Image (cartoon, grey):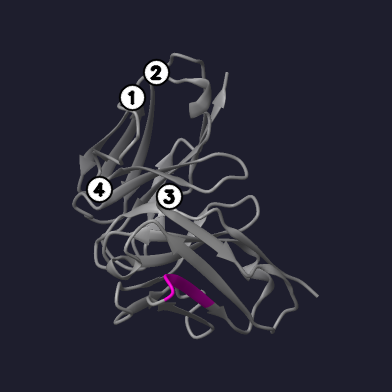
Amino acid sequence: DIQMTQSPSSLSASVGDRVTITCRASQDISNYLAWFQQKPGKAPKSLIYAASSLQSGVPSKFSGSGYGTDFTLTISSLQPDDFATYYCQQYYSYPLTFGGGTKVEIK
Amino acid sequence: QVQLVESGGGVVQPGRSLRLSCVTSGFTFSSYAMHWVRQAPGKGLEWVAVIWFDGSNTYYADSVKGRFTIFRDNSKNTLFLQMNSLRAEDTAVYYCARAIRGWRGYIDYWGQGTLVTVSS
């Protein structure tokens, strides 16, 4: 199975900050990497697929990059609505696997 | 608009069975692969199973293989998860999710989830 490791597991940031979350795969997954946002008590929301492509309706302040084993999710200017937990997921092979999540909290 | 609505969750005793449903609308259900993903209380996301658009192929997580069965009824736009021999560690919110294809296809939409509690 492919292991997905996210860092940090949590971070505190202020409104307006630029935030970067890292995701590392245990083997080469090309660009078969997705990012999801989840707020407490809610279903996940799809943000990015193919490492860097925005899902329809997702604001451009979210961006993704990376290829192979190392990936990043960047939020350019954090807003109150962005405080949530973010997960990466590989869909290169089965079983699909998720990172452990990064909780973004208000400083 | 795309909608996925899960149902069938509840409290069940260990060793018993439960069937979850995911009724879909707003898209051509028979053209998409479908997944089940679960989340134990306070934990992260865990993939459970996938079924191809036509039901021709399925994959399962090792933790549920042999106990859970994913299937679909394309005439009713509905996805199912039959869960047998339930264990306490199966307690979770179960989400259905749409993927653009079965092999190397990304998830784009999620349902709101249904809670399954396995307890005596």
Q: Which residue is mark 2?
A: A77
Q: Is residue B90 magenta?
A: no
What residue do we see at 65% from left, 82% from top?
A: B17
Q: CA gap, disc 3 to disc 2?
A: 23 Å
Residue B4 at x, y percent in the picture: 47, 58
Horizontal arrangement in the rendering, residue A27 relative to residue B92 (left or right): left
Residue type pointed to by label 3: Gly
Residue type pointed to by label 2: Ser
Judge depth for marks 3 and 4 and give the one in front: 3
Q: Main secondary structure of the magenta part?
A: strand
Residues marked 3 and 4, same chain: yes
Q: Quadrant of residue B11?
A: bottom right
Q: Which residue is mark 1?
A: A61
Q: Chain of mark 2?
A: A
Mark earlier in primary sequence (3, 4): 4
Residues marked 3 and 2, same chain: yes
Q: CA gap, disc 2 to disc 1?
A: 7 Å
Q: Chain of mark 4?
A: A
Mark earlier in primary sequence (1, 4): 1
Q: Quadrant of residue B35?
A: bottom left
Q: Which residue is mark 3?
A: A99
The front one of B71 and A82 is B71
Secondary structure under the numbered disc 4 in the rendered image: loop
Range of the magenta residues? B76-81
Judge depth for marks 3 and 2 and give the one in front: 2
Q: CA gap, disc 2 to disc 4?
A: 26 Å
